[in-house]
Image (cartoon, rainbow, N blue to C red):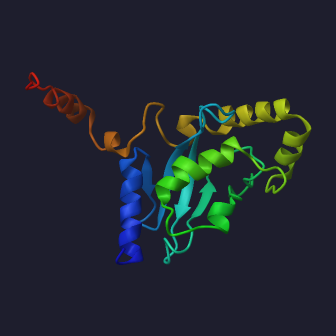
Amino acid sequence: MSSPSKRREMDLMKLMMSDYKVEMINDGMQEFYVHFNGPSDSPYHGGVWRIRVELPDAYPYKSPSIGFVNKIYHPNVDEMSGSVCLDVINQTWSPMFDLVNVFEVFLPQLLLYPNPSDPLNGDAAALMMRDRTAYEQRVKEYCEKYAKPEDSGAAPEEKSSDEEELSEDEYDSSDEAMVAGPVDP
């Protein structure tokens, strides 16, 4: 890579091309929100979180700052601030990683495999170790209360920021424009 700013642009574009809804906070490319869906096969399934991402000037050599905006019940996420306790982001970050890794690997792994022995939310960690069923029920309650698609600012079917940019009339006409003739053999 020729410079951190080029890499930042490339990683952000790659994230947008991966069908994540990304909202820029200001004119620069250093602060933005990403809509993140809870992984299937987990008590977080069905939840949608708005994740605040801040890229430092030294990105990708320095890790991004990641935080949940809407509440989540998890041992490794501070309930009030949304800060995330995740070694790969906080301590073992490498320039080989990119933003897509954060949203397709690191955060899903965090939600699928919480670490109650290194908690930011002591109540969640204690409940998880004491009664896994009650913990999973509390997670689902939080999802229902704080992580519905409308809580993150997304409509239930929204997945890509491209859809948002078309008006209803433009959307209808773009569907018609996509009708193609027979495929050549």
- For the residue pair 141 and 180, the one nearer the viewer reads as 180
Give the quadrant of residue 176.
top left
In the rendered image of this protein, does residue 178 appear above or below residue 31? above
- The x, y position of residue 103, in whole percent, is 53, 50
**Left or right of 88 in this view: 167:** left
Name above or below for residue 120 compared with residue 137. below
Asked whether the viewer can see residue 49, the reply is yes
Does residue 147 appear left or right of residue 85 in this picture? left
Residue at the front extreme of this rendering: 185
User: Where's residue 70, x and y in %?
Assistant: 63, 47
Residue occupying the point 71% across, 37% down: 142
Query: Which residue occupies 43% across, 46% down?
Result: 21
Q: Count the marks.
A: 0
Residue 27: in sight, yes or no? no
Report the residue at 34% width, 77% height from top: 2
Q: Residue at x 59, y 37 (%)?
A: 39
Above or below residue 124? Residue 62 is below
Q: Nearer the viewer, residue 122 or 26?
A: 122
Q: Quadrant of residue 3?
A: bottom left
Q: Position of residue 122 (x, y in %)?
A: 86, 52
Is 149 positioned to the left or the right of 84 in the image?
A: left
User: In front here: 23 or 110?
Assistant: 110
